[in-house]
Amino acid sequence: MRPVSAAIATAAAACLLAACSGSQPSTFAVTGASVDPTYWCPGGANNAKYDLHATVNVRNGTSHEVSIQSVTAVMTLAAVQGSWLEKVGDRFDAGIATFSTNSVAAGASASLKVVIPSACTSDKYGGNTSSAGDYAVTLRLVTSAGAFAVTAQNQHEIRAA
């Protein structure tokens, strides 16, 4: 091997070794979320309350426990079928949700079970019309490691008469 080639090979090996053993900052991360796919609004319902369920996957790569302080949700109408009371782009702030896990241990992963308050309105079933609204659901977590937002990988559909 030529001296220059040997020097380059040595430098490359040192660089690779440093990258492999280097300390990258550890973080808390929200890695994904999903929501109930469909809710059938009862016929004749007027602003009827129901629970929308979500799962939020988190990973705590820090060396400290991270506490989950609050979870809120916003639902944005992404698409409609038939006659719908709202228009695409309208947002519904569902407010504070309840959740199952108050903290995530250092180096651990968890799936938060979230219950989001929602409501729906529907004509009586049996007519010729039916409608549906598809909502993108964004969850916001406030934690001891900072604030995080994640939009569910699937949309939540509300079906009405």
Image (tube, rainbow, N blue to C red):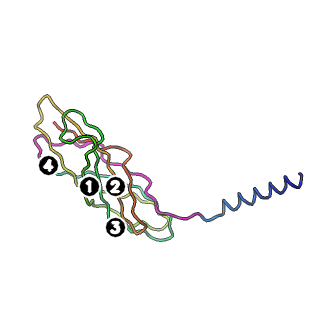
The amino acid beneath tag 3 is: Gln
Using the numbered discs, state the Cα–Cα distance from disc 2 to disc 4 in whole angstroms: 22 Å
Residue that badge 3 annotates: 69
Q: How far apart are the two marked residues, 1 and 2, measured between alpha carbons?
A: 9 Å
Numbered disc total: 4
Left or right placement of residue 160 versus residue 76 in this view: left
Q: CA distance from mark 1 to mark 4?
A: 15 Å
Query: Label 4 near label 2: C-beta < 8 Å?
Result: no
Residue depicted at x 85% and y 55%:
6
In the displayed structure image, the side of residue 27 where residue 112 appears, left or right:
left
The residue that mark 4 highlights is 47
> Mark 1 near mark 2, Cβ–Cβ under 8 Å?
yes
Which one is earlier in the sequence, the residue at label 4 or at label 3? 4
Identify the secondary structure beneath mark 3.
strand
Residue 42 belongs to magenta span: yes
The residue labelled by disc 2 is 139
Location of mark 1 (residue): 116
Q: Residue at x 32, y 52 (%)?
A: 54
